[in-house]
Amino acid sequence: MKKIMIVNTSVDYFEGTSKPTGLWLGELVHFYDYFNSKNYQIDLFNINGGNTPIDPVSLKPLMLDRVTKKYYNNESFMGMLRRSKSIKEANPDEYDVIYFTGGHGVMFDFPNNEHIQRAINDIYSHGGIVAAVCHGIAALLNVKDENGRFFIDHREITGFSNSEEILVNRKNIVPFMLESEIKKREAYYNKAKIPFIPYVKVDDRLVTGQNPQSPKQVAQAVDKLLNKH
């Protein structure tokens, strides 16, 4: 049985503000749902352990599609999110895939987390797949290999674009612009021609999705790689 670890944020407010944030629920459940019907073990983690905050915007009627609604109304699933293990407790050597969800919360607790960085290097070095969607790509920003080279250096990659950040009116409260930071690390950043349509890049065993519309497509790309290996 293939094993997948999913990592969510533990941050519930934009730093220095009273504006709530957290996990973008759809980015978790569309990926989870894809593999939940197959022969996989899926384990949920966040940074601190315990409750995983959910961005209230991701629960608005416009965002709450059928799949997201199904999981949001599933007490057992939501209970798992409230009782998540901390990534500190994870043993990355056991997993074939690590997947990082988004929501603006991750911009504060993903980029400099040593457990995230170790997990990415461990899973990738034993032939596993590293995947992330939207702001979840923040997890990849500061990962380096044993030679001190950035993990995403010279890789084909996507992530939430600067134009999308402006369109959702978060430009002035985010700690950085993700697209700009990706480019600073010499990655080959690509995005869809139109904001908020599904877009995925695959570079060897690294799979990234641009925005909240992309998690199912990320899951499909991961599945294809798993079957290839």
Image (cartoon, rainbow, N blue to C red):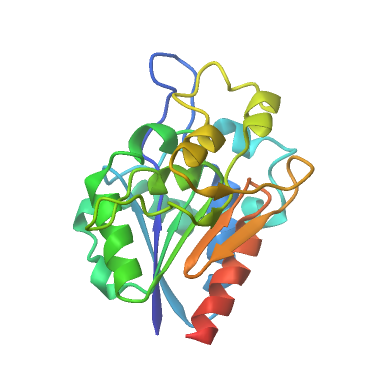
Residue at screen point 40% across, 49% down: 140
> Dividing the picture into quarters, in which one does residue 37 lie?
bottom right
State the residue in front, 66 or 194. Answer: 194
User: In the rendered view, does 48 fall on the left or right side of 61?
Assistant: left
Looking at the rendered structure, the number of numbered marks drawn on it comes to 0
Quadrant where the image shows the N terminus: bottom left
Query: Is 226 drawn above or below residue 53 in the view shown?
Result: below
Query: Would residue 152 be found to the left or right of residue 159 on screen?
Result: left
Residue at image x 58%, y 66%? 219
* Image x and y of residue 196, in percent: 73, 42
- Indicate the quadrant where residue 50 lies: top left
Outermost residue on the right side: it is 194
Q: Position of residue 63 (x, y in %)?
A: 70, 41
| Residue 110 appears in the picture as rendered | yes
Q: Quadrant of residue 90?
A: bottom left
Q: Position of residue 209 (x, y in %)?
A: 59, 54
- 39 shown above or below 148: below
Q: In the image, what residue occupies the spot 56% across and 32% down?
A: 56
Left or right, residue 51 beside residue 14? left
Residue 82 or 8: which is nearer the viewer?
8
Viewer-side residue, 59 vs 174: 174
Residue 229 point in image, percent of width and height: 47, 85
Q: Is residue 107 above or below residue 45?
A: above
Residue 72 visible (yes or no): no
